[in-house]
Amino acid sequence: METTIEHNCEQVVNNNHTMTPTIYRVEKNRRDTHDTFTLHLSPEDQPLETVYEPGQFNMLYAFGVGEVPISISGDTTEWPKLVHTIRAVGSVTNALQSLATGDSIGVRGPYGKPWPVEATKGKDIILVAGGIGLAPLRPAIYQILHNRESYGKVILLYGSRRPLDILFRKELEKWRSRLDMFVDVTVDSSDRNWNGNVGVVPRLIDTANFDPIDTAAFVCGPEVMMRFTAMALNKRGVSSDNIYVSLERNMKCGVGLCGHCQMSNQFICKDGPVYTYSQVRETVLIREI
Amino acid sequence: MQQTLEPYLAEHPFLKGMNSHHVELITGCAENRRYNPGEFLYREGDEATHFYFIRHGRLAQEILRPQKGGIVIQTSGPGDVLGWAWLFPPHFRNLDCRAVELTRVLALDGVCLREKCEQDHELGYEIMKRFAHLMEQELESMRLRLLDIYGNND
C-alpha cells in the first residue's frame, strides 16, 4: 500500500486529536535488566480512544524532553491500562526511566499495523524474538494463549546477549512450564553458570518442531537478526508470505506526516511496522535506506 | 552394536544422500557413549580423535580464561554434529568440551575414519562436503555474533 504525505495531512486535519497527547499516570516503573525497564500506565482522565492491538506502538512524551515511539508490551485485555517496555539509550528514554509512581506522561496512539494474530488462527505459530524484540511480541503471545485452542503448535524462540539481559525471565519460565507451548532461549555468550543454549537464535529454528507449510512466523528484533531468521525459516520451508517482521525506523509523528520513517514508498509508522517478509525483503537490502 | 547404530546414522540429516556402503564404513568407526553433567569430553590441547553425533542432552564448547574460568562459545544439542579437529592436522583440540547435562552421543573414531577416507577417496569427498557445510553454518553464526546485535550499537 502506498500513501502520500498529502493524503496523511488530510487525515490529520480531519482529526485534530491525532497529535494531541493524552495524559497518563505512572502506576509502576519496574526495572527489567540493567538498561531496560517497564512502565505501567493508567489514564489520568480519558483513555486513548482506540483499543490497541498486538504489535502497535504509542508515542510516549517525556514532558520537556521529547517523544519516542515505543511498542506496547502489555496484554490487550487490560486496556485502558498500558504497558511499555523501554530500553534506556537516549535522552528521552533516560528521562522516562527516571519517572516515578504518580508522575505524568503524554501518550499518543495507538499507531501502526498489528501482528496478524486473528488472521493466522489455525496455523502453527513460531515467534522469534531477539533482545528487546520480545516486548512488541508479548501482546501477541498473550492473545494467542488466551485463544490457545485456535492455533496449532506455539513455539517461542528467544535470543539475548547474555543471561543477565534476558527479558521477562519469570514469564518465559511460566510459558516454558506450559504443556501446550514450546519455549527455547539462547544467549550469544556466557560463563559456566548458564546451563542453557549458547549460539544465535536462528540456529534454534533448525531443530524446532513445526509444520512449515502451515506456519506463521512473527519475528522481532534487530534487523540483521530478522534477516537471518527469515533465511533460516525459508530454509525450513516457511514461505516469506507467512513470515511477519516488525521494522524499526526513525518514527517521529506516528501518522505518516513528517516522513522521517519513510522507507522506499512506505511510511513505517503508518503502513507498518509489521510487514510480511516478502513485502520488505528487497527494500531492507537497499543500502541507501 | 553396529546393527543398532547403522539405522540411526543412515537416517541422520548429516549423512543424507550417502550410499549404504559408505554409511556401513562409517558405522564401523562408531560407538555409543554417555557423559554425566560436568564431565569433559575433551580439553584444549588434547589429540582430536573423535567427533560426535549428539543424541540427547547438551554439550558446551568453552575457552578457558586464566583466573576467570571457562567462557561458553557455543552449545550443541540433539541432532547436532560436533567436532572437526580430527580432520585437519595437527589433529589437536583448541577448545574444551563439557557435558552441560546428561548427554548421549555416537562417538565416531576419526583416526579410523581418516584411514578409510584415504583408502576410499569417494568416501573422503562425501565426508569433506558435509563438514564443509557444517563449517559454513558455524562461520555464519559466528559472523552474526560478531555484530553484537543486541548491544547498544544495534
Image (cartoon, coloured by chain):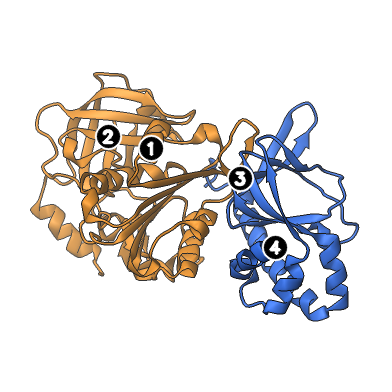
Chain colours: A orange, B blue
Which residue in the structure is indicated by mark 4?
B135
Name the quadrant of the N terminus of chain B: bottom right
Q: Confirm whether circles 2 and 1 share one chain.
A: yes
Please identify, in this view, whether the residue under mark 2 or under mark 1 is nearer the observer.
1
Where disc 2 sits, the SS reads: strand
**Residue found at the far right of this picture:** B90
The residue pinned by badge 2 equals: A83
Is residue A86 visible from the viewing direction of this image? yes
Q: Which x, y percent locates residue A8?
A: 19, 60
The amino acid on which the numbered mark 2 sits, given as a three-letter code, is: Val
The x and y percentages for residue A256 are 26, 57
- What residue does disc 1 label? A177
- Position of residue A89 relative to residue B147, above or below, is above
Q: Is label 4 in contact with label 2 (beta carbons under 8 Å)? A: no
Residue B58's disc number: 3
Pointer 1 chain: A
Q: Earlier in the sequence, mark 2 or mark 1?
A: 2
Question: In the figure, is residue B130 to the left or right of A20?
Answer: right
**Chain for mark 4?**
B
Q: CA distance from mark 2 to mark 3?
A: 36 Å
Q: Residue at x 80, y 42 (%)?
A: B43
Q: Position of residue B112 (x, y in %)?
A: 84, 64
Q: Residue B130 occupies which quadrant of the picture?
A: bottom right
Element at label 1: loop
Q: Are marks 4 and 2 on the same chain?
A: no
Type of the residue with mark 3: Arg
Callout in the foreground (3, 4): 3
Marks 4 and 2 sit apart, C-alpha to C-alpha, by 43 Å
Disc 1 residue type (three-letter) = Ser
Between the residue at mark 1 and the residue at mark 4, the CA separation in whole angstroms equals 34 Å
Please give the name of the residue rendered at 25% of the width and 53% of the height, measured from the top-left corner.
A112
The chain holding disc 3 is B
